[in-house]
Amino acid sequence: MHGKVEVSGVNTAKLKVLKNEEINRLLKLSKAGDKAAREELISGNLRLVLSVIQKFIGRGENVDDLFQVGCIGLIKAIDNFDLDQNVRFSTYGVPMIVGEIRRYLRDNSSIRVSRSMRDTAYKVLQVKERLTGENQREPSVEEIAKELGIAREEVVFAMDAIVDPVSLYEPVYTDGGDAICLMDQVGDNKNTDESWMEQIALSEVIEKLGKREKRILALRFYEGKTQTEVAKEVGISQAQVSRLEKNAINQIKKNL
């Protein structure tokens, strides 16, 4: 998605961001049957979908397809969100979008093996079965290769090609609801859904800050500059930098 502005016909550079209070107001209207409010909720949370699909880019999937599937998850989240629960919509919406994308990847993932490779594999199996019967033992790779007149590596590759791969999106358990996939059981202490959602929430909060506050935080915490260095670059006093930095951090804490 690097440098990609338009996704599925949507200009991502012009997407609006709704405040939490506005989201709650629109959710109430949507639950009451207001279709216009529902549409505004969808368009106002497309940045959330964009944030989520970043996690799945690089797997050979079309970005537009991922975005459309993510939008389905967003719509499900809007339609099923419980207003009585004291949680932010994004906290509920992100797992719904992730789940929809994971189901799509699971149902559409496939590893294709060439016809010639499969033909070689079947020949290997036939020779292996015949030699096992003749010698009362399983033949070595070298013996099979010699019998077929091919390289040892070809035998190994052919046998690997017909072994059913285990997909990360292969269901390993289901209790009648959504299946639990192998991917869900793979541990990652660094990129957990919790830390990932915190990063999304943090990005949303920072987006609401003023242009000068954003620049000060970037210079201070991304470039590691002192308040005095920031003051010279921004063109204000060190005391003003300190005050603006403190206010920005307090605003982030409050919104999180």
Image: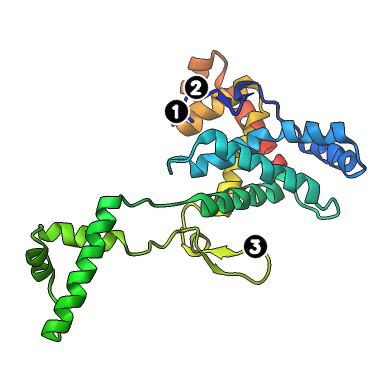
Quadrant of res 65: top right
Q: Nearer the viewer, residue 119 or 142?
A: 119
Badge 1: residue crowd in 10 Å (few <14, some 14–19, many ≥20) = some
Circle 3: residue type: Asp
Quadrant of res 152: bottom left
Residue 93 position within the rendered picture, expressed as x and y whole percent measured from the top left: 69, 47
Circle 2: residue type: Val
Vertical relation: 19 (above or below) 76: above
Residue furthest toward the right? 32
For mark 2, give the secondary structure. Answer: helix
Q: Nearer the viewer, residue 159 or 219?
A: 159
Vertical relation: 120 (above or below) 17: below
Residue 237 position within the rendered picture, expressed as x and y whole percent measured from the top left: 57, 18
First in sequence, mark 1 or 3: give its number: 3
Q: Is residue 62 left or right of residue 197?
A: left
Q: Which residue is mark 2?
A: 230
Tell me whether circle 2 and circle 3 mark residues in contact (CB < 8 Å). Answer: no
Q: Is residue 164 left or right of residue 109?
A: left
First in sequence, mark 2 or 3: give its number: 3
Residue 41 position within the rendered picture, expressed as x and y whole percent measured from the top left: 78, 35
Query: Which mark is nearer the camera, 1 or 3?
Result: 3
The dot on residue 178 is: 3
- In the image, what residue occupies the spot 17% across and 77% down? 130
The answer to whether any part of residue 27 appears in the image is yes
